[in-house]
Amino acid sequence: MSTAVSSRAAASPETVALVRRAQRRVGRRQTLVTAVLGALVVIAFSLSLSLGEFPVPVVHAIPMAFGYGDPASVWVVQELRLPRAVLAAAVGLAFGMSGAIFQSVARNPLASPDVLGVTAGGSMVAVFGLTVLGASGVRLSLFASVGALLTAVLIYVLGYRRGLSTYRLVLVGIGIGAVAAAVTQYLWAIALYHDAATVAVWLSGSLNGRGWESIVPLVVQLCVFVPAAFMLRKPLLGLELGDDSASAIGIRVQGARALLILVGVAFAGAGVGAAGPVAFVAFVSAPIARRVARAPGPVLLASGFLGALLVLVSDLLGRYALPDSEIPVGVITGIVGAPYLLWLLTRTNRAGQGD
Amino acid sequence: MPDKEIDVTAHSHTDDLVEMQMPSEPIPVHPDDDCRLIGRSLRLGYDAGDIVDDLDIDIPTGRITMLVGANACGKSTTLRALARLLKPRGGAVTIDGKDVHAMSTKSLATKVGILPQTPTAPDGITVADLVGRGRYPHQKWFRQWSAEDQEVVAWALEATGIEAIAERPVDGLSGGQRQRVWIAMALAQQTEVLLLDEPTTYLDVHHQVDVLDLIVQLNQEQGRTIAVVLHDLNLACRYGHHLLAMKNGEIVAQGAPSAVVTEELVDEVFGLRSKVIQDPVSHTPLVVPIGRHAGF
């Protein structure tokens, strides 16, 4: 009788080849989808730079953003359009990755930061900062992030009981989101006339008139959070198996989950701080990316790209759908996202899912 | 702790009427002799109240241990504590003398594999991919898949006989196949100890026997230490070297199934009147319930 397990397992070469092939296929599809989405983001970005009252050729748009071209066009692209395009892409990326992390950690497509009320909490504190303390730029972004974090902690504490039930999490989140929305409404109602107008635009999720002072903090935050998210990718894959199985394969469940939620909240807070609660981008990006990639796990970068694409395209639509007026980007994304939420709710109910 | 130690040689059937993989090694008379996974003075429970109070438990190395008992007797809770899925309120679980709660989660995951009661697979994941996730404790976060990882996954697929369905999505598999996939994932961790929490629940009798045969095979081929929480007392008797019968959070009997399973024990543990006869196939105890309406 041997008491030790043979350390070197012997398998037939065919099975090894099979395993390698299966893994490569999943990996290749994900890489391909990510690359295609990245290319689409570049195209939408170029369109955003080129279209307007003074159009420039699409293919020259990006070189112009770097200062190559005739001075008039370069000025238009760099000064008038570049901030908006960068903001759209960065906000979309932030919300897309935030949603991917949240939905994977909670193992529920409903558990995105906008449905859970995390963005609503961030908005509430940001509106407080905006109306009561007159915050803007970096300070406004900070208010939004702190608000999102506090809301997430509250939801987690109230939703946690002997493990994390995603069902309870979603219910608690919706409740807290409603409270946050009500407080936001109140702050808005008592705000001074000038502030109230700013709040109205901000709350609908708008990219209009945001300068570099709200873009730079967002980009800096992304430079920190994107690598952080990738470092946590493997534990995230494990957490998708459920607490027990994740723990069984050696993941420190509580610690990994807390870190991941922190990064997900940070993304959401950064997005809200820069552009307001752009509706449903976090909610729809990851499931679509995941479906397209046919991925069994979170596709972080693809979700981020999809979010960026969604915001860029929605912004273009908002700018040109109606003559002589502009629809805030959040309104367009809301029009896209709301039917998906309804569809998901009916489907979830029918299948009796949600533990 | 009551510990019924009865001479196990009294029950030694050698006639091989039916050829089957049966646990055949001699059963250790003193389980403490060779136990690397043990629990001492365990106090376990959830929210309010303790389910287990002051329990000592030994899982004999290289054998199949079956934990049996009525519902809510604490057998699953005890297994969860051994697997570190539940932190004891008192006492300690040790492996090779080391407290499992003082070890890193990863290094424990290379020693003890666990199949939880109702594992959930992510949507659309394929068999090979899910089994591959069992390699996590052997991987560094910056390192990609190694040739060894692939080899071990392939071996785990073969050992559980699921290499033919390696590329299929887990969602579409039958309950029995899915259970094999989860066992394969635990095998990919390459642990010497394997803990299974009711691996046959929701399976029909054919697949129950299938899974238990696989467990015996894993024990025989690699000498793995295996502990299983099982509802079916007869299958537990047939497939276990060592039986732990629990009631109200205490071990009321332990030893070889043929030595400890008696009509009195079944009555005590399950509150069931029964006849204990010999299983004509495996020659292990077979519990035949009497019930209220039997007129014989």
Image: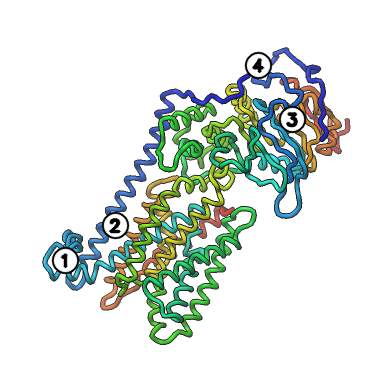
Q: CA distance from mark 3 to mark 2?
A: 62 Å
Question: Of marks 4 and 3, which one's residue comes earlier in the chain?
Answer: 4
Crowding around mark 4 (Cα neighbors within 10 Å: few <14, some 14 to 19, many 20+) is: few
Q: Quadrant of residue A43?
A: bottom left
Give the label on residue B19, or none. Answer: 4
Q: Position of residue B279 (x, y in %)?
A: 76, 23
Using the image, tell me which numbered label, if any, was put on residue A41. 2
**Same subunit: marks 2 and 1:** yes
Q: Residue at x 74, y 54 (%)?
A: B48
Tags 4 and 1 on a common chain: no
* Amino acid at dot 4: Glu
SS label for mark 4: loop
Residue A48 in the figure: left or right of residue A5: left
Q: Nearer the viewer, mark 4 or mark 1?
A: 1
**Which quarter of the figure is the C terminus of chain B placed in?**
top right
Mark 3 or 2: the one toward you: 3
- Quarter of the picture containing the N terminus of chain B is top right
Q: Chain of mark 3?
A: B
Q: In what element is the residue under mark 2?
A: helix
Given the image, what chain letter belongs to the residue carrying mark 2? A
Kindly identify the amino acid type of the residue bearing the numbered disc 3. Answer: Leu
Q: Which numbered disc flags the more N-terminal residue, 2 or 1? A: 2
Q: Which residue is mark 3?
A: B243
Q: Position of residue B280 (x, y in %)?
A: 75, 20
Q: Are marks 2 and 1 in contact (CB under 8 Å)?
A: no
**Which tag is nearer the camera, tag 1 or tag 3?**
3
Q: CA distance from mark 2 to mark 1?
A: 18 Å
Q: Which quadrant of the view contains residue B26?
A: top right
Q: Amino acid at mark 2?
A: Val
Residue at point 72%, 25% (across, down): B33
